[in-house]
Amino acid sequence: MKQSNDFLTLQEKVTAMIREAIFTQQFKPGERLIQDELATKLGVSRMPVREALRCLEREGLVIFFPHKGAQVIGVSNEDIEELYYLRSLLEGITVQKSMNFLTKKDKAELQTLVESMDHDIETNNMDSYMNHNQQFHSLLQKGCKWKKIKILTKELIEGYPAYVPILIPNTVVVSNQEHKNMLKALEENDPIKLRLLVENHIMRAGNKLLEFIED
């Protein structure tokens, strides 16, 4: 397991390392994760390991059993394909419905976030990039008036998809260029184009995650 990012807190670093080990099947589905062993292997105390496992439980990658501790659930290719396909469809619809209700202030903030992500890439700050990326996608959906679809989209985004920029940092240059293309679609007032750009953006991220797992 390798450290994923120098800008993360200790607990976040431990979480990133265990997450990567699960995705690359160094830790296989059904395998028990013993806190003392992980702490020794990673050279840290039990506290960040325990917090990391709880974070991964919320992401759906591990499960805790009474008196047994944590066990890897893992994800299959089918799980990833399903999640990203559903997310692409729902988020695509959401941004299409959102476009006409975004204000000039919203659009200016989206531009600022894209510029911030460019800076994050230049400084190799993937933790900051991840946060700005989440803000960008959330703001792009802000204008949608459909409450149920926004709830479903939020559920699909939360968990490990949010951490793909940290897991696979070499994808972020292309990703942020796609963000810039979305801003152009906003300028052109073309909601269909925006929806398709978002759908392709999400599906590409899912495909890159599959490639990462298969390497």
Image (tube, rainbow, N blue to C red):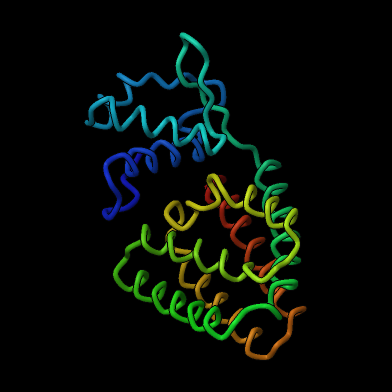
Percent coordinates x, y for residue 157 in the rendering: 60, 52
**Residue drawn at 41 percent across, 36 percent down:** 18
For the point 63% across and 56% down, which residue is it? Answer: 207
Query: Taking 188 as reference, is 117 above or below it?
Result: above
Residue 161: percent from left, percent from top: 55, 51
Where does residue 17 sit, x and y in percent of width and height? Answer: 37, 40
Q: Which quarter of the figure has residue 53?
A: top left
Residue under the image location 65 percent in, 46 percent down? 80
Residue that sits furthest to the top in the current view:
67
Identity of the residue furthest to the bottom in this view: 188
Q: State the residue at coordinates (50%, 73%).
A: 176
Residue 107, relative to residue 16: is it above or below?
A: below
Q: How many marks?
A: 0
Q: Nearer the viewer, residue 2 or 138?
A: 138
In percent of width and height, residue 88 lies at 70, 60
| Corner quadrant of residue 61 | top right
Is 148 located above or below residue 124 in the figure? Answer: above
Left or right of 204? Residue 171 is left
Q: Quadrant of the N terminus?
A: top left
Image height check: is 53 above or below 114? above
